[in-house]
Amino acid sequence: MLQNYRQAENLLGEKKDKTDPDKSCPTIVLKSIDVSLEDLRLGFPDKEDGIKLSHLVPFKDERCRSSELQRLSGVKNRFIITYGDAASRDDDTEQSLADQVRKYNSEHNPSSHMFVRHKPLADIYTLGRQAKLYNLWRKTRDQNAETIKNEEQNKGKPSNHSAEGIIIDIAEILFGRAKKLLREEKSIQDIIHAALLALEAKELLGGKTPTISLELLDLQHQAEVLAECRCYGTNYNKQTVSRRIAEIKKEVYLICQWYRPGSQRLASLSARSKIVGGLSKIFADARQIEEHETTLVETRRLSGLLFVHHNRWALPLYPLRWYFELLQRSLAVFTFIVMSWFLFFVFLWSWNFGQSLGESAYLVFNQLWERGEIGVGQSHFLTQFLRFFPFVIGSTHVVVLISSVHSRIQRK
């Protein structure tokens, strides 16, 4: 994160020697950059007058972003962040933003590509997909985890499932700094810094010390979610949370591979439940209702799996628990399930008693709320089934609906 023009010039520019303007001074060496997030209006207070960093490409020999920060042209995917209309004209130039982006892409394709994104932004996973880096990142992560695992197995002796002592010490120092930053945070930058420290420490361990790695993963996601909730330029939604939950599942799985085979599933379920439960509290405190509901549903599902894992006798009853959890997932899901039951009973009634669908629907609707006498159908079993079961289904779903609504009101 660059906060002033001097930093940007040292990292991304080519400084000239004052005694010899044609000679460049040494600058910090950077590796190739895959993605950059750039504000369109870079208002660095220390930049020189006449430098127009809001202009992406040169126009009439002016000093613009491309001419002053030349190394940006080597970035593979550049996201230009703005709150305005991409098609609107800039106040200080005859080139619109759309024209500048089009010109840049035509000159630098395919080595570098520029995108325009408007606030509020989507999540980082969406940006990764747009830059066609998300799948590559996941593949690289999985390959690195597999490589580390294979290296340990090829050493010819059992692994102690722990990283080297110096690596653990460095990771714990980074972990302590991240926790302190998050505990004493005064800005979004502090929260992002904490997330980066936790990420670096986790990558440094490579999962070989699973307990610390899982704690770092928990802190990383807590810091990322907290930063996104605090930032008004970020657009959060249920799909974003679902992607994060999927990432947590995959990363926890890779870390838990270092446990013995008999403990991997239990460790994975416990870690995922704790991490997602922590995110649920952050969403609740931030009044992110839909996101809170999504994480709450996942936490409830993981708790059910943990209960079955510890109590094998409850395994035959788990489908019933899963069904009641499904009913409470959302009002749309509840309505769809109730309508499915209703249509099932209507078609069954119509076939058994030989009545029209309309008449069957009317009779089934009444049977849902009160158990009345019915005629004799083609099947004695179906007749008795239709006499009792619709009433049981109707009563049960009403109780679930009232309980779910009451629970939601209490949380809000």
Image (cartoon, helix red, strand yellow):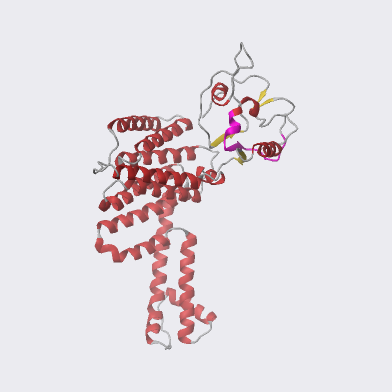
Judge whether 406 appears above or below 278 on screen.
below
In the image shown, does 71 or 398 lie closer to the viewer?
Answer: 71
User: Which span is picked out in magenta?
Assistant: 71-89
Image quarter for residue 392?
bottom left
Residue drawn 64% across and 40% down? 109
Q: Where is residue 126 in the image (x, y as percent from the top left)?
A: 53, 46
Q: Is residue 20 above or below residue 360?
A: above
Residue 74 part of the magenta segment: yes
- Location of residue 356 in the rendering, given as x and y in whole percent from the top left corner: 53, 83
Residue 17's quadrant in the figure? top right
Residue 194 image offset from top left, x and y in percent:
41, 33
Pick the front one: 107 or 349: 107
Q: How far across and how far down the image is residue 233, in percent?
A: 55, 38
Residue at x 39% of width, y 47% of height: 276
The verdict on residue 409 being magenta is no
| Figure disc tally | 0
Residue drawn 42% across the image and 44% down it: 141
Q: Is residue 52 above or below residue 333?
A: above
Q: Is residue 297 shown left or right of residue 350?
A: left
